[in-house]
Amino acid sequence: MSSGASPETARTTPSSAGVKRLLARTLRHLSRAALGALGVLLVTFTLIHLIPGDPVEILLGDAATEELVAKYRQILGLEGSLPQQFARYLASVAQGDLGTSIQTGQSVNSVVARTLPMTAWLIGVTVLMALLMALPLGVAAALLRGTWFDHAFRVATSVSLATPSFYFGLLLILLFAVRLGWAPVAGYQPGFPGNLQYLWLPALTMSGALVPILARVLQSSIAETMEQEFVETAIVRGLPAPVLVWRYLLRPSLAPTISLLGYILGQLLSATVVVEIVFNLPGMGTALVVEGVLLRDYPVVQGIILIFALIVVAVSFLSDTVSGWLDPRTRLS
Amino acid sequence: MLRPVHSAVLLCLVVLLACGPADDGLPGPAREPTELPIPSVTISLSSKLTNLDILGSAHQPSIVTLYLIAGQLFRLNHDWSVEPELAESMEVSGDGLTAAVSLKEGLVYSDGTPVTSRDVVFAYTRNRDHPGPYFSILLEPIRQVEAPDSKTVVFHLKEPYLDLSLALAHMAMGIHPRSRIEEDPEYFRHPVSSGPYVLKEWTPGASKWVIEANPNYVRGPMAIERIELMAVPDPTSRVLQLAAGTIDYVYDLPVTARASLPAEVEAYPAPHNGQYHVAFNGGLPDSHPLRNAQVRQAISLAIDRDEINQKAFGGISPPARGFQYAGPLESLFNLPYEGKRNLAAARELLEETPFRDGFSVTLQAWGQRSGWTDAALVIAANLADLGIQVQVDPLEDAVASANLRSGGYEMQFSGLAAGPMTFFRSQWVPGSFWTEALRYRNPEVIRLVNSASVATDFDRRIELIHRAQELALQDMPLVPISERVVLVGSRIDRKILFEANLPPGTNPMVATMAELQRHADPSSAGD
């Protein structure tokens, strides 16, 4: 009777299978991303062209004549039917060229390169700040269920969720910037760590909507984990509190929170649009509204939304991977 | 839809500021005029600078910056008079068809290269050969321009042109070196300057750009040595930044913000050289009530301009008395009852029309503009007294503008700002934006405005343009509402800004920005 594979083979087979699974999953994500990006391009292109307001008329102002509008339309490559324009745009995007801004004549790639770092910093600081606040809050709320803290937690998170970010931001500016002078009222200077001075208040504003969601999900998740047998066993074994909380409560409960973080990134990106304008931050959100939508600068709008979509897909993939590392049950499923 | 929200937020902020300590964390008082020259000031605009080539953009940041970084032959004063800037003198021939302009001695650009008459000719030919938004309005009467020598420019005109110096003071005639523009396709990313300031830092689309006093400016030195211009799209953020001292000067403040500003910030109205109006779509079917001139006149009589001024514009926007804002001699104050509301007279007029029982209509408004939707709401309430049911529809600027062009509106609350003759040409002469938007054609009005434009005698011009306004009053293609005035908030002493060359330009923002072109002469600053 043959034993089949050698011990080495037996050890490597699951690893190869794991790599294959990872590759398959990556390919699946990439194909989804490509399809999603195409869909986003199509929808964005259609919507921005459907809404009234002509970029050439905006460019030329009150003095624009019909002849001048027609001439500029030709110069700016806006002539032809919408399908023709979309085909041209798609071809240039396929070559990595997001087009040229109608209003500034700059490449959209350079607009993205100019604005993306600031927005990435803002989102990074927000996520970090939100996690630092949500983790202890969620754990405390789970461990202290039914107490006054739990009730206060529910009320505070409800109020925070119900407050619009632009209003919350203005209140924070008034308190921390105008009254206390702890932060600049608005503006941004690139370069770490100096930029953190300009970012902490906008990040706190965005955290106002993020922390309640993350903390509540974590609270429910921990509550569910606490009912598992392995937690009871750990308690019976008399493990130290930090080990019990991290290894047996927090770590297995974090996966849904991290997955959620990936999924709500889209919401976070849309929040940056409002918060960047309120805090006058020169990021992608400001560029999208001020340079793109209001001026009907089609390539800028399309380019930035495409980048937003790709970021959401990438972070979703990343959060799935991290969730799998944190909780093996996610991998198995 | 954002306007009420913004107003509510501003109200909350006002209350919060009022409840807090008086001066915590706020910077010191405004600068005194004796501190001249001021090393640096920060000014906020509502949008970003996207383009510095006059052929490519008509946005306010471009206009403001262009006036500051390019010299013209003439420069506008606050009262629409002009004075020589790069020009030494202008001599017009007896028949009014030729004008010879001599340049000042020793003119150089900011980089030290000489300003020549060929550059002036090029400024014209570039506009002519690549028509931008201003050519048809300003430079069309010019037939040819030549430079017989390096210091003289001769303008040959198709017809006498009383406003030639005004046209030459427009930013469209900003003087740049021909050779640099021809050699460098990217010239307007880093232009040299023949004007008061020179561009120091700018990336198209960036939120901040910097200009510094041009050391070679023929009328320098400047009172303010460095100006940082910042795009701050959110009006509430503009208020907060002004209050906190990170911005020194804000041009367009919400009127509700006045109470929340600290004592060292001076808030004052700045005339915009224009008027708000209700435009009627002349392309509507003949059966539409608004195609009836008597209905339009009744609407004009029923509108309470004082109420609009108080409720929508915080009392800073004087009610209109005629088709054009007060000041220029071209203005005729011919609205019945001096523009005051007379509901009885309005009812009487409406009674004589087939629409005596009233009707329903939609009034569009530019929803992003401070006070415009509020004004439309007051008008709706006023017209309800006349039996006209008005639904107010606030729109994004781009949509409102597109609707005017496409004829997708019945009535629209809007505004126009321009120099005296341009103001009338824009509304009543075919080819210009507002005439096309209104679909208004009255051959006699057109003839009178055209004749006034080419009149060589100023009194004759006034007579003709007044007659045009009398005729237009019968047609009432639009209802004048009130003068366009915006609220300015400034930490810079007002004397520095207001005493000196205050060109109004064709744009209010230009007027205010150009306030900064004052010479650094302390003796006149305190006058």
Image: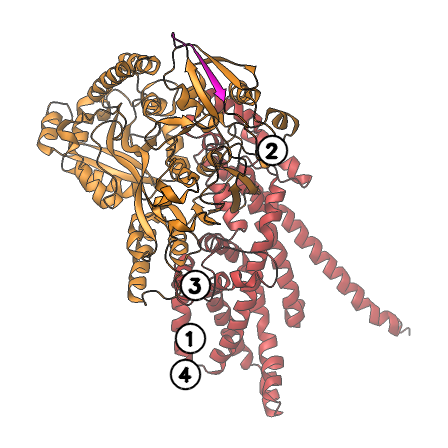
Residue flagged by tag 2: what amino acid is it? Gly
What chain does mark 4 sit on?
Answer: A
Mark pair 1, 3: CA separation: 27 Å
Task: Tell me the element at label 4.
Answer: loop
Instruction: Confirm whether the magenta stretch covers residue A276.
Output: no
Mark pair 2, 1: CA separation: 68 Å
Residue depicted at 49% across the width and 22% down the height: A68
**Residue A4 visible at all:** no
Residue flagged by tag 4: what amino acid is it? Thr
In percent of width and height, residue B200 lies at: 57, 42
Q: Give the range drawn in magenta.
A: B93-103
Residue flagged by tag 3: what amino acid is it? Ala
Q: Tell me the residue that label 4 is attached to.
A: A147
First-in-chain label (1 vs 3): 1
In percent of width and height, residue A93 lies at: 64, 39
Q: Tell me the residue that label 3 is attached to.
A: A177
Q: Tell me the residue that label 2 is attached to.
A: B112
Mark pair 2, 4: CA separation: 77 Å
Categorize mark 1 by other alpha carbons within 10 Å: few (<14), some (14-19), many (20+): many
What chain does mark 2 sit on?
Answer: B
User: Which colour is chain B painted?
Assistant: orange
Q: Do labels 4 and 1 share a chain?
A: yes
User: Which colour is chain A painted?
Assistant: red
In percent of width and height, residue A105 lies at: 58, 35
Q: Tell me the residue that label 1 is attached to.
A: A153
Categorize mark 2 by other alpha carbons within 10 Å: few (<14), some (14-19), many (20+): few
What chain does mark 1 sit on?
Answer: A
**Residue B135 visible at all:** yes
